[in-house]
Image: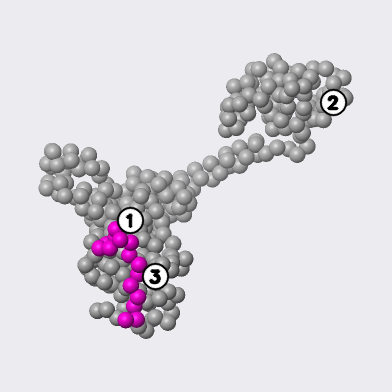
Amino acid sequence: MFSPSHTFIDIPFNLRHTCWFCGEPSSVTLEFPHHDNIASSLNHPLLSLPACRECRSFKTPRHTRSIWVLRAHIKQALITKYTKHLAVGENWTEQELQESEFCGALLGGFGESAWKMYLIAKQRVAFAGWPLSIDDQMLDILDDTSSFAYNGTQFPSLSACIDFLSEGSGIDKELLTQLVEIVTPARFGYAHQIAKINKRPSPVQRRQIIEEITQQEIESQQIEAEHQAQLRIDSAIVDVNLTGATAPAFAIQWAVRNQANSLMTLSELEDDFFDQFAHLGGAAVFHAYNGLQLYLQARGDADWVKEHDPNRALWPE
Ligand SMILES: [Zn+2]
């Protein structure tokens, strides 16, 4: 029912019959908040939005504090309702589904419609609506929900994503949760991969996997720290300018550490040098190497070293 206290949001012309929550055709209006008693705690006006019947039908908590929280609840409800269809995409690729249908044994008639249902459900969950405004005044600056994107799907939160992946797919929720804690959400795909190949672990297996991955992470952090130490330049080392070239401090440091103290030893380690500094780009590495060659050549002259080498203290006598 239309209430005069709720204001209709602006609707772009091309989306005038679209559910703001899921992108399906809209046939009804959703008013938020539904109960006047929470209106005073809202940080945006009372809103009317175009919606589909299904999105409007979901029960959501009475204390929902903003339209964006409501949207997160509705997406969660969609995920829960369509987990079976979404999980199809998690477990099988489209090709696998077709092949399984071809041989007829695995899924029976299920394969034909399952992939379509999966794509539709995924699209509805991922649909981001359009920026909210009333009479061209934007409301989006007030969005206070954080969401989590994985594999092109937007989830209301990290834990909603974990819930979805573990429901109905045999992935162990506790294992995935702990793995994400260890490897961080930034490497969610890696954690998911490990959880996928260790479906339905026993408590003992789960503990072993966690220990293994923890150990792996500690080791790779140590390697990374050593690598950083290698790259850190000792502030006592300075660039050396030679005729037509510069031997940069980082290259000199590398030479000292690798005991490349003559042109001959340097040329033996040439490949190592180029590998170590490949991240700088070909031209920069070449210039550094060339500068280092000239520097070592100059160091062949004891008088030059005494007079001109600012780094002479670094080298063994
Ligand atoms: Zn909808």
Whether 162 is drawn above or below 224: the answer is below
Query: Of the numbered discs in the image, which one, if any, rests on residue 135?
Result: 3
Q: Which residue does the numbered mark 1 point to in the structure image? A: 126
- Which circle's residue, 3 or 2, is located before the other in the chain? 3
Image coordinates for residue 247, horizontal then vertical, percent: 72, 27
The region drawn magenta spans: 4-18
Q: Which residue does the numbered mark 2 point to in the structure image? A: 308
State the quadrant of the N terminus: bottom left
Q: CA distance from mark 3 to mark 2?
A: 74 Å
Callout 1 amino acid:
Ala
Q: CA distance from mark 1 to mark 2?
A: 65 Å
User: Horizontally, is 243 left or right of 101 in the view?
Assistant: right
Give the overall secondary structure of the magenta segment: loop
Whether 302 is drawn above or below 138: the answer is above
Mark toward the viewer: 1 or 2: 1
The residue nearer to you, when weighing 6 against 317, is 6
Query: For residue 15: magenta?
Result: yes
Callout 3 amino acid:
Asp
User: Horizontally, is 201 left or right of 317 in the view?
Assistant: left
